[in-house]
Image: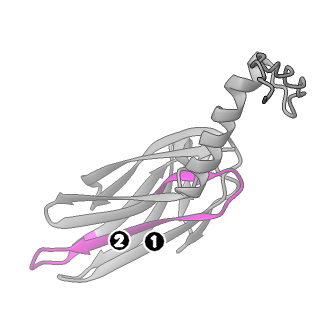
Amino acid sequence: MARRRTAKPIEVPEPPEVKRFIKLEPLQVIGIPILAAVVIAGFLGAFDDRSARSDSRGAPLAMHVEFPSRVQYEQSSQLLIEVRNESARPARAVAIAIDRTYLEGFETPSFVPEPHAITPAAYLIEVGDIQAGEVRRLAVALRPEKVGRQEGQVHVSSAGRLLAVIDLSTFVFP
């Protein structure tokens, strides 16, 4: 006769306690995603230098300005100004003025052509007479020495009469 076995419940042992390899404090749980977001933003170009362009027309002159809208501290950039005579007659005694409030945030700006005068309010660059259809260009090499927003204006005048104004605003980040 065959022996009959009764089924006993099988006892399964408790799993061993496993130590966590990574132990995060509450502040770290918040900080890690923030740091990851900053890195991702950097890869996507959020901290790259950016340029802005602006145009102004004041008969007979048109002015086009390219300036850094966002630049990193101590990173070189350029302010480019182009003045065009759009009339059929020459524009006499054309001058460009750049506010000192804007340029004071930069380390000794370098101008081509050089300013003819520096007043308490502005750097003055005389570009002379501009014949019909001609263009005059001004380049200013900039290197930020202050973090924050630099704001000012560029003014163009002919024979002492103001013809065009463009606002400049550059954010310098660390």
Expressed as whole percent of the image width and height from the top left, the position of residue 166 reads 32, 50
Does residue 142 lie above or below 113 as drawn?
above
- Measure the alpha-carbon separation of dots 2 and 1: 6 Å
User: Which residue ends up furthest to the front in the rendered image?
Assistant: 1
Q: Is 135 in front, or is 125?
A: 135
Q: What is the quadrant of the N terminus in the image?
A: top right
Quarter residue 136 falls in: bottom left
Quarter residue 87 falls in: bottom left
Does residue 3 lie above or below 124 as drawn?
above
SS label for mark 1: strand
Expressed as whole percent of the image width and height from the top left, the position of residue 158 reads 27, 62
Q: Could you tell me if the residues under marks 2 and 1 are in contact, i.e. CB atoms within 8 Å?
A: yes
Which residue is under mark 2?
A: 82
Which residue is under mark 1?
A: 138
What residue is shown at x 64% (from left), y 34% (from top)? 33
Question: Mark 2 is on which residue type?
Answer: Glu
On screen, residue 20 versus residue 137, left or right, reads: right
Magenta: main secondary structure: strand
Residue range (magenta): 68-92
Q: Is residue 56 magenta?
A: no
